[in-house]
Image: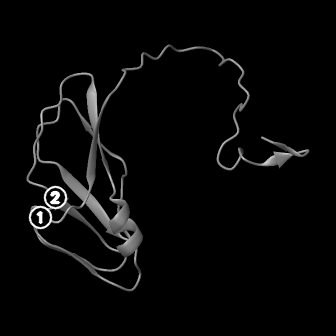
Amino acid sequence: MAAEAVRLEPGRRALVGTGVRIALPEGFAAFVVPRSGLATKHGITIVNSPGTVDAGYRGELKVTLLNTDLDEAYDIAVGDRIAQLIVMPVTRAQFIPVEALPESVRGDGGFGSTGIKKDGILA
C-alpha cells in the first residue's frame, strides 16, 4: 500500500514509498508486480516489473509506478493498494565458463524467433 499521496500525470512515473520493510531469509527473494485492476482500468504499471527484493535488503520497499495513460492523470492516496509482493525460494546459479554451449531446439534465435510457422510447423 502507498505510504504517501502521489499524482501520476499522463506518461509519467514516480517512486512511491510503502512504509514497509522486510527481512527475507537466505534462499528467498520477493518480486514486486503490478496490480491487474490498476493496469486494466487506469494504465498504472510498474516500470521495472518485477522489481526484485533480495534477502539482504533491509530498506523500505518502494515501487516505481508508471502511468501509461496518455490523457488522464491518476491520483494515489495513502493506503491505496499499488502493487503485489510475491515471495519465492530462489536457487543461486553457479556459472562455469565454457568454449561452446550444447545445442538446443531453440538455438540462438532471439526476439520474435519462436511462435512462427516454418513450412507449416510451429517453431
As helix, strand or loop, the secondary structure at mark 2 comes to loop
Q: Nearer the viewer, residue 122 or 21?
A: 122
Residue at mark 2 to residue at mark 1: CA–CA distance = 5 Å
**Where does label 1 land, which residue?**
79
- Circle 1 packing at 10 Å, graded few (<14), some (14-19), many (20+), is few
Q: Quadrant of residue 92?
A: top left
Please name the residue shown 64% across and 48% down the image: 111
- Circle 2 packing at 10 Å, graded few (<14), some (14-19), many (20+), is some
As helix, strand or loop, the secondary structure at mark 1 comes to loop
Vertically, is 50 above or below 38? above
Indicate the amino acid at tag 1: Gly
Q: Quadrant of residue 104?
A: top right
Is there CB contact under 8 Å for labels 2 and 1? yes
The figure's colour scheme reads one colour
Vertically, is 92 above or below 109? above
Please name the residue shown 68% across and 17% down the image: 102
Q: Nearer the viewer, residue 85 or 103?
A: 85
Residue that lies at the very extreme toward the bottom in this rendered image: 71
Position of residue 82 measured from the top left corner of the image (x, y, whole percent): 24, 61
**Where does label 2 land, which residue?**
1
Position of residue 12 measured from the top left corner of the image (x, y, whole percent): 32, 73
Position of residue 16 measured from the top left corner of the image (x, y, whole percent): 18, 61
